[in-house]
Structure formats: C-alpha cells, structure tokens
Amino acid sequence: MDKDLTQLDAMIEKYRGKPGVLIPLLQEAQHLFGYLSKDVMRYLAREMGIPAADIYGVATFYSIFKLKPQGKHIIRVCKGTACHVSDADSIKDALISALKLEEGADTTSDMNFTLVEVACLGCCSLAPVIMIDDTTYGKLSPEAIPAILERYSFVEEQ
Amino acid sequence: MKPITVKVGLASCGVAAGALEVYNTIKEYNDRQGGLELKQTACIGMCFEEPIVELDGGTAGRLSLGKVDPARIIDIIEEYRRGELPKANIILADTHPGSCNSLLQGQTRIVLRNCGVIDPKSIEDYIAKDGYSALKKALAMKPEDILNEVTDSGLRGRGGAGFSTGKKWSLARDSKGTKKYVVCNADEGDPGAFMDRSTLEGDPHNVIEGMIIGAYAIGADEGYVYCRAEYPKAIHHLKLAIAAAEEHGFLGQNILGTGFNFTLHIKEGAGAFVCGEETALMHSIEGKRGMPTLRPPYPAASGLWGCPTNINNVETWANISWIINHGASEFHKIGTDKSPGTKVFALAGKIAGSGLIEVPMGITLRDIIYKVGGGMKTEKPFKAVQIGGPSGGCIPASLLDTTVDYDSIDATGAIMGSGGMVVMDEGTCMVDVARFFLNFTQNESCGKCTFCRIGTKRMLEILTRITEGKGVPEDIQRLEELSSNICKASLCGLGKTAPNPVLTTLRYFMDEYLAHIEEKRCPAGVCTALIRYEVIADKCIGCTACARKCPVSCISGSIKQPHIIDQDKCIHCGTCYTVCKFNAIRKG
C-alpha cells in the first residue's frame, strides 16, 4: 500500500514538542491509514525525533493499535464475564462460520470484516453482545448472526 | 394544555436494545403532530427492561415503560394523552403498581441520583438539580475545611482498594510542588463491570464537579479523565460537558471569579487492562507503555511528569458534590461505621434484574440479589456471585448473608473491587470460571514481573488441563503454590490479585475441582471434553435425526429402533442433544 506519508505532516505539526502526545498521534495516524505500517512508524519517529523502538513499543503494548491492514468493518465479540457465562463462544463460532474465516485468520479475504475479541463492552445486562463499528447488538443467539452481518455485507461495486 | 413529557433512555445499553428506533419514531410523530416535549436521558439502571420510555404530565401520572416496542409506542402515547393508563409494560409508576417499584426501594441513590433522570447533554438540566451548587459552596470554603469534610465523611476509594479519600487528598495537598494534577480513573477494565460507563454517560457533570472541588482542595490546576476508548458515548458526553462547564465559567481561568484556575482534559485509553493501576495509568497519560512502577513514591508525592498527583475513580469523584452539599455527618448516616455511604454495583449474569444499582453499604448480598436484583433469571438455583472481577472471587450460597462493606467482603477472599457482580447458577462450572479469569489476567499481564508473566501462564495451563479431563491430583497443590508465589512476587495489583478467582473457587468449590480431576466429570455440564452424551433407550423412537446430523457419524441404529452413540468416536459437540425432539439424549 503506497500512501503519501506527508499526509501525516499536519498532525505532526499539531503535536510537535507537546508532552504525552504519542498515543493520540498514533491513534490519528491509524485513523488516517487504517493501521500502523512500519513505514508510518518510521516516518513518525524521524519527524518527531522519537526513537522508533519507543513508537513500536507503544504500538504493540495497546490493543487498539493494529499493525496489519484491517477490514472495513470491525466486529468486536465481547468475552466479558457475563457474556462468557451466556455462551459467547457460540456467538464467536457463528461469526467465524458466517464470515468463512480460515483457521487463525481474523480478516475476511474481501477485507470487509475483521473479527476481534474484546474483554468487555460494558453492556453486560444484554449478554451475549457484539459491537460492529460503533453499533452494539445484544441478547444474541448464534441464529441471529447471519441477518446482522447481512446489513454490512453489500460489497461496494462502485 | 401542559405538554406531555416523553423521555427516552439513550445510554449504550438502551441503544443496543433498540432505543434509538423508539426515539426516532416518537420524534417523527412529534415533528408531525407536536404537543410532546421529547427529551433524552441516560440509564436509570434497569437495563433488563430496555428500551425504557418515561411519560409524564398526563392524568395517569409519571410512568416508566419497559421493553417498549417501537411499533406500539405511538398508540401508547396516544392512550396516555387521552388520560388512559396505557396498555404497556409499566415498570415504575408514582400512583400505579409498577413491576420494578420494589427494586428501587432497596436503593439509596447518591452517585446515580441524576442518571436516567436528567439529559446528560444539558448543563441546564444538571444545574436545575442543584448542580454546581457544591462547587460554589466549596470555593467559599478554605481548602483545609474541604479536606476535613471529605475525611470526616469516611469516604473510601470506590475503585476497589478502599483507601480513605480525604487522607489521599491531604497527602497530595501536603506534597511540595507548585504544579499538581488530579486524575479521574475511568479505565473500567473489569469484565462484567459498567458502573463508570453508566455514570459518565448519565451524569458527567457530577464527576466533573467533584474533580473541580478536589483540585481546589489539593491545589491542582490541571486534570485528566482517563477513559476507555471502548466507551465512545461516555467520551462524547464528557466532551460536551467539559465544553459547557467552560462556557458557564465552572472550568478554565478564574473560576466563578475566585481566581482559581482549573483545566480538564480527556485522555482516551488505548486498550490495556493494566492501565487501571494508577502508576501504569500515569505512564499511559504521558504517552508511554502503561507499565506499573514500584510505589513509593506514591502519585501523591511524584505522579504525572513527576508532579504530585491525586487519582480517584469515577464513583469516588461522583460522591464529592453530595458530601459538600449535605455534609460529612449526613453521609455517615448511610452505610456502616467503617464503610459509610453507598456502593454502585453492576448486576449481570443469571439475575433477573440485571443492570445498575446503588445500595447502602451494610446490605447483605442476599438482599442485593433477591430483593434489589429481583432474584434468579432461570429456574436453576443460585451457585455463586463473582465480585471484584479478575481481582475478586466467587462467593458461594453459604455466605450470602455477608454484608457489603470493604472488610467483610475481604474476609471471604473476594474484594469489593469496583462493583462488578456476576451472578452464576448451577449451570456455571466454577473451574471454567477460574480458567476464564486466569486467561484474562494472563493476556493482560504487562510482562514486567516474572511470576505474573509466567506464573499465570502455568496456572492457566493447569486449569485448561483440568477442564479437558487431563488433570492430575497434584494439580491442586501446584495451583496453591503458584498462587501464593504470584501474590508475593508481583509488583502491582494486577499480579497480586490475579490468583484470587482460583483461590476462592478452590476454597468454596473444591468438590468441583475433584470431580473434574478424579471422576473426569463436569458437574455443571460446561466443560465440553467431559460431557458425555447417551441415548435414553426408552425415549428414543428411532427417528434417525441425530444419526443424520452427527458430524462424525458415531450414532448408529435402525429406523424405529433405539440408537447408540459410539463413545470412542464422539467429539462431544452436542448436535444430537440439540436436534433430538424427544429429549432422548442425556447430557452429563
């Protein structure tokens, strides 16, 4: 993916010299490019004067940062306590089979969906819960999954 | 004619249950017809009844309706406008029976007093409920008097550890330094807990007001709210609230003309449970990896960027305005002598009334579950309640009369924690629950301390082995040894408390561990590898449904004859159990 890294310059200027900006800077960079490639991290390191190892260290520490390209829609499967005791595993299995994800893969081959597990979405009373982008779906059963995915599945042909 | 007020609860849980559709339906109707005052509010705590709509101003009085169907809501509103009692699921009512009236009776609301009542996006709503009056009162007091008031109230840190808030504030005030910070810990990472999310979504100004008062008392001029990125709505409401408070002169320079300055920022967490630990949280605000460091120095002496810093949790800050307005002695009248005030709990799991509650300290767990929480959701009997998340433990039925205060909960081996309470019934396997929490802490361990990094991994391997039927008798002792070493040799709270879920389940549910290890049996029927499926010959009519669906073809038999499962080939998938229409498959 050849992206113009100079797109980062505006945010670099905004944050340059301010304390504690690395995390928001990486969040914005990820928002721009969808994930943090090595090129992006190296560019930020050089321009901000921060060691690349520090940037990589932060990027790998926090689960929000993605080092690989992500699908267009992010599906978060809640694995919190309430969801666990309400059989969240069956929801995850239903998602994997509906998305036809291969063993070990988290993103569909058409790059439409990425499936991630999260510790808790804080909607425990609606367990089991998933969140697709910013929308939460609660009180799920494995049977409900295909219809929900359907809403996100129209492939852009334009 | 006075307009009818319609309030729709639009917190995350409400929206997930379909409240937005209800709201939009009413809005469309009102845009067309008019006559309604349509308002938004957040979470009143009865998440199991979402979407919730409140009607007021009609002759039927104030009514809250639960599980509102968007297709029915316009009819309901019209019935209400005609003065009738709507044909709907009435959960709360001033003058009529409401199915949840009794659930609220056991509660005392200080922190949640405005949640689900006001529009959290409106500072005017908050001010109309005496909002920011405590700030005005506090700014007229000497900082020392505020510290005394908070100390005398006996308020203890609601994040779980229970340290005296007044004492913590005094330490930060007494620390030398011209630049000081206050921080609100809203990195609510415990799975099964959503108190902070609801508080921030439902009444953000109350938290902000508490922080301004704290900053004034300590002598800080800058603050941070560190909030999980998984809570977009809470962050949105906080941003709006901070902007509105600045506009009204409650935040910024020369607050209310007193010369006191305080600016407040939001820092979004980036997904690391360990950042709930205060030293890790500060490193994260500084833009570094959120690794805990040794205390002392405590944040009160050397915190953010080396400056004295006071960190409290959302719920602690949310108690402050009430304490300033009503006084320490009024606060002391609620709860117990050593644990005054209230505690917010997030009820979830196999409980009928899942949601958010605020109860006076000193109430028993039994009353929380059976009175305030409405009892069990299913017919299966109560087995345990998990308190305190991954740092806490499972309390069995025999200890249900334990009272809720820091010291009594500690005595059970669990901890008060931040307030997650997950109720489990006989269908929950306690070994599996222990494995679940160890899996969580093992994932979230930052890796700094060897015992936490590797010890939790070894514990998880042992627990996994037990749930797969491969446990050996020595495993129990190994778990106990590892637990004790991890507690002793870890730096921060995450590691020190990580073994608690295992220790409490070993203490109260040893028989389940033994059943898994010695009899290779999971009494709750959860651990897949240990479940045995058998055909009950008397009930099997030989329809062949199970044999046709079995993915490994291990069921044999002729049509209209009882079938047999080949146990050597069976992969315990449970398909036969699900497809059998004659209850002829025994699971156990």
Image (cartoon, coloured by chain):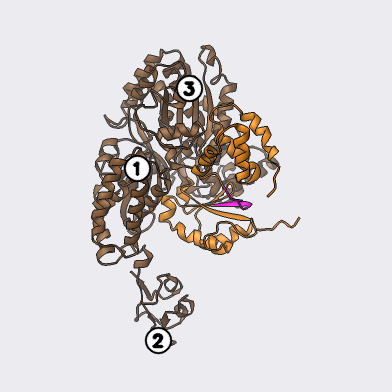
Chain B's colour is brown
- For label 3, the residue is B212
Relative vertical location of residue A8 with respect to residue B541 in this rendering, above or below: above
Q: Which residue is mark 1?
A: B495
Is residue B210 shown to the viewer in this render?
A: no
Examine the structure image and report whether residue A68 is included in the region drawn in magenta.
yes
Badge 1 or badge 2: first in the primary sequence? 1
Q: CA distance from mark 1 to mark 2?
A: 57 Å
Nearer-the-camera pick, B435 or B485: B485
Tell me which label, 3 or 2, sits earlier in the chain.
Answer: 3
Going by the image, does B364 lie left or right of B86? left
Residue B388: % across, % down:
35, 43
Q: Which residue is mark 2?
A: B561
Quadrant hosting residue B495: top left
What chain letter is assigned to the residue under label 1? B
> Against B409, is B581 above or below?
below
